[in-house]
């Protein structure tokens, strides 16, 4: 049987990470995968997480199955922290998922079950897994403009493309810190988008993977909350991988908003049924950690302070890169990067230039130009800037518009 298996395409991101692992050059710099690293290059367990784990270990008495919705207290905590101030928590159904990816897939399956002909619109460029997850669920995918030719936000282009979204369609948006571009919409643009959703009836689907790492937790949730108050139905996938540093514990939540309580009950059952055919129940540990933190004022404050410190370090890294690129004469590119937010920035380099950066400077980013700003130790930033400047100088040309290469 297995000899009939066609050669599967390798995952480009993990392929690059594997290439980095065998690179022995002393200057090598791994900026491929989106994980936060501190000034020593380590991805630490957050102090609030460590303390929650100790408390859980002390009081744990059983590893009995949870229900299909996972940890109910976690789901409630997620709904409150995402929607909190909107007062919309009783309009929400939620199930715990296998991280943000699990939430994306569950919600994609829900869309397929309720609107089999729906098109899901994703940004161009998009998070590398959005299209495969949606297509694996049997959905049609189309793209809307995200960036202009200079790599800046293009709300007019986006709104123009989304004029073509139909009533049964779903529009997938990243709530903040857009992966891969680092480019976010202004709040005015989010409001214009909400107006379009209200007028045309399509359903917003918000992917929250980096809240707390852009402008601060509340600021990063502002657009999601505003949209939630304007539209009757909304889908939200939440990842705790980055903002709690729980990458390998696979912790996340799928939230659905509807004005009808009857609908919400059906939605939760439908999500449970989908989960049952995929993995049955999500893993408990990360959800228990997050719940322990969010339900305890002291631990919550510790976590918020750590999250703010991570955000501060990422901003400082980006500001430093911008300063060094400006110092090397690349003021236009530096200015573009200065407006980006969150863990990632998109460099003004083509796939060929990114390869050059890797081959000649041992600097690893993705072919689309994405680098993990949160993954650089501060003393390595001048080296990164010099590598970028050298590659730009050699080709004498800027990269093509980001949308053309993603
Ligand atoms: C935009 C976006 N959504 C969702 C995810 C899923 O994250 P996870 O499954 O690790 O929680 C990621 C991870 O990189 C992401 O960048």
Image (cartoon, rainbow, N blue to C red):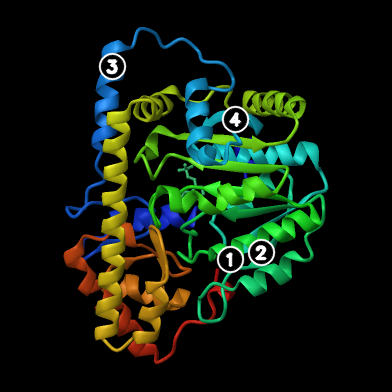
Q: Is mark 2 within 8 Å of ligand 1?
A: no
Q: Residue at 42%, 52% (x, y): give it.
A: 14
Does residue 210 appear in this view?
no
The disc placed on residue 188 is: 1
Q: How many marks?
A: 4
User: Of helix, strand and loop, which one carries label 2?
Assistant: helix
Contact (Cβ within 8 Å) of mark 2 with mark 3: no
Question: In the displayed structure, does residue 50 sit left or right of residue 73?
Answer: left
Question: In the displayed structure, does residue 225 sit left or right of residue 77?
Answer: right
Q: Is mark 3 within 8 Å of ligand 1?
A: no
Contact (Cβ within 8 Å) of mark 3 with mark 1: no
Instruction: Please name whichever residue, 315 or 278, is drawn nearer the observer in this view of the structure.
Output: 315
The residue to which callout 4 is attached is: 94
x, y percent for residue 284 = 44, 22
Relative vertical location of residue 195 with respect to residue 103 in this rendering, above or below: below
Relative vertical location of residue 334 with respect to residue 233 in this rendering, above or below: below
Q: Residue at 58%, 28% (x, y): give it.
A: 95
The residue carrying pointer 4 sits among few (fewer than 14), some (14 to 19) or many (20 or more) residues within 10 Å by Cα, namely many
Q: Residue at 51%, 37% (x, y): give it.
A: 84
Quarter occupied by residue 137 = top right
Instruction: Please name whichever residue, 12 or 249, is drawn nearer the observer in this view of the structure.
Output: 249
Ranked by sequence position, the earlier of labels 3 and 1 is 3
Contact (Cβ within 8 Å) of mark 2 with mark 1: yes
Q: Label 4 vs label 3: CA separation?
A: 26 Å
The residue carrying pointer 3 sits among few (fewer than 14), some (14 to 19) or many (20 or more) residues within 10 Å by Cα, namely few
The disc placed on residue 57 is: 3
The residue carrying pointer 2 sits among few (fewer than 14), some (14 to 19) or many (20 or more) residues within 10 Å by Cα, namely some
Ranked by sequence position, the earlier of labels 4 and 3 is 3
Q: Label 2 vs label 1: CA separation?
A: 6 Å
x, y percent for residue 383 = 22, 73
């Amino acid at each position: 049987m297995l000899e009939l298996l066609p050669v599967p395409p390798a995952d480009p991101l993990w392929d690059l990470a594997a290439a980095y692992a065998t690179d022995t050059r002393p200057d090598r710099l791994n900026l491929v995968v989106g994980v936060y690293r501190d000034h020593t290059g380590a991805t630490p367990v957050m102090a609030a997480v460590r303390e929650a784990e100790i408390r859980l270990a002390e009081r744990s008495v059983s590893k009995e199955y949870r229900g299909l919705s996972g940890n109910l207290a976690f789901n409630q905590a997620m709904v409150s922290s995402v929607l909190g101030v909107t007062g919309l928590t009783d309009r929400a159904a939620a199930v715990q998922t296998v991280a943000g990816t699990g939430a994306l897939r569950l919600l994609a399956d829900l869309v397929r079950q309720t609107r089999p002909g729906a098109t899901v619109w994703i940004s161009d460029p998009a998070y590398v897994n959005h299209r495969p997850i949606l297509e694996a669920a049997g959905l049609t995918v189309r793209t809307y403009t995200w960036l202009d030719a200079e790599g800046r936000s293009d709300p007019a282009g986006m709104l123009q493309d989304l004029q073509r979204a139909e009533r049964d369609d779903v529009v997938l948006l990243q709530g903040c810190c857009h992966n891969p571009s680092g480019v976010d919409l202004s709040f005015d643009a989010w409001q214009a988008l909400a107006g379009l959703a209200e007028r045309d009836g399509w359903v917003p689907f918000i992917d929250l993977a980096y809240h707390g790492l852009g402008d601060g937790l509340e600021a990063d949730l502002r657009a999601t909350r505003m949209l939630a108050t304007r539209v009757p139905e909304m889908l939200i996938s939440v990842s705790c991988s980055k903002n709690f540093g729980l990458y390998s514990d696979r912790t996340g939540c799928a939230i659905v908003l509807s004005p009808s309580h009857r609908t919400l009950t059906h939605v939760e059952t439908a999500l449970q049924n989908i989960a049952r055919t995929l993995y049955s129940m999500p893993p408990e540990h990360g959800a228990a950690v997050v719940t322990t933190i969010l339900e305890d004022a002291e631990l919550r404050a510790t976590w918020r302070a750590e999250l703010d410190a991570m955000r501060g370090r990422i901003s400082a890294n980006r500001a430093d890169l911008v300063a060094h690129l400006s110092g090397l004469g690349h003021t236009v590119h530096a200015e573009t990067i200065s407006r980006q937010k969150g863990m990632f920035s998109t460099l003004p380099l083509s796939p060929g230039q990114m390869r050059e950066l890797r081959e000649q400077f041992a600097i690893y980013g993705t072919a689309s130009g994405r680098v993990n700003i949160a993954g650089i130790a501060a003393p390595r930033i001048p080296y990164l800037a010099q590598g970028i400047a050298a590659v730009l100088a050699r080709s004498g040309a800027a990269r093509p518009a980001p949308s053309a290469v993603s």
